[in-house]
Image (tube, grey):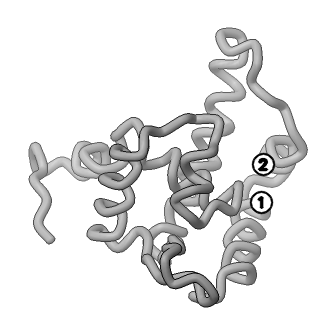
């Protein structure tokens, strides 16, 4: 799979992939919300259109950020799982949550303030470690 990058800068190269409006939302849904099927993604609060979701899931697969398999008892349903490369985005997701809490809460009055956010603030490294471990334990691909 070849992807066109704008330049040789590592940050810009990462943003060429991760800077897309939907990519990190999908990863977040998998990591924090346990979403695995196309239907689960389409039913989320973020309201991603099905054609866009299909395109983004395919790109994530091509980049080896997610893998696709079939649901064992229903071969028509695809299951999406984060790979090690996908799981390596966990610290980025956590940092975005913390940055958003610190810098956007005033602008987004409906932003939730849940237990997960408090755990991130209390011990970010432990939260990241526990989140990765939990994901691996709950997804048989690991």
> Foreground: 54 or 84?
54
Query: Which quadrant is home to the C terminus?
Result: bottom right
Foreground residue among 115 and 122: 115
**Residue 127 appears at what percent x and percent y?**
77, 60
Residue 114: image quadrant is top right
Q: Within 10 angstroms of label 1, few (less than 14), some, or many (20 or more) residues?
A: many
- Residue 131's quadrant in the figure? bottom right
Across and down, in percent, residue 124 comes to 74, 53
Q: Residue at 62% across / 32% down in the picture? A: 99
Name the element at disc 2: helix
Label 2 packing within 10 angstroms: few (<14), some (14-19), many (20+): some
Q: Is residue 7 above or below residue 129?
A: above
Q: Quadrant of the N terminus?
A: bottom left
Of labels 2 and 1, earlier in sequence is: 2
Q: CA distance from mark 2 to mark 1?
A: 6 Å
**In the rendered image, the vertical position of residue 106 relative to residue 54, given as above or below:** above
Image coordinates of residue 122 in percent, x first then y, are 86, 47
Reading the image, the residue beneath label 2 is: 120
**Dot 1: what SS?**
helix
Q: In the shown orientation, is residue 74 left or right of residue 5?
A: right
In the image, is residue 29 above or below residue 138?
Answer: above
> What residue is at 89 percent from the left and 45 percent from the top?
115
| Residue shown at the point (35%, 40%) measured from the top left | 19
Q: Quadrant of residue 102?
A: top right
In the picture as drawn, the residue positioned furthest to the right comes out as 115
Q: Decide: marks 2, 1 in contact (CB < 8 A)?
A: yes
Q: Position of residue 93 (x, y in %)?
A: 58, 49
Name the residue carrying label 1.
127
């Amino acid at each position: 799979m070849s992807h066109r990058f704008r330049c040789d800068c590592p940050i810009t190269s990462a943003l060429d992939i991760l800077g897309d409006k939907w990519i990190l939302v999908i990863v977040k849904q998998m990591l924090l919300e346990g979403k695995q099927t196309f239907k689960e993604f389409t039913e989320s609060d973020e309201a991603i259109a099905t054609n866009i979701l299909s395109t983004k899931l395919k790109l994530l697969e091509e980049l080896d950020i997610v893998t696709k398999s079939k649901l064992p008892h229903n071969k028509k349903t695809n299951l999406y799982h984060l790979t090690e490369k996908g799981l390596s985005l966990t610290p980025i997701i956590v940092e975005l949550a913390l940055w958003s809490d610190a810098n956007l809460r005033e602008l987004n009055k409906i932003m939730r303030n849940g237990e997960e956010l408090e755990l991130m603030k209390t011990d970010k490294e432990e939260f990241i470690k526990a989140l990765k471990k939990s994901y691996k334990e709950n997804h048989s691909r690991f």
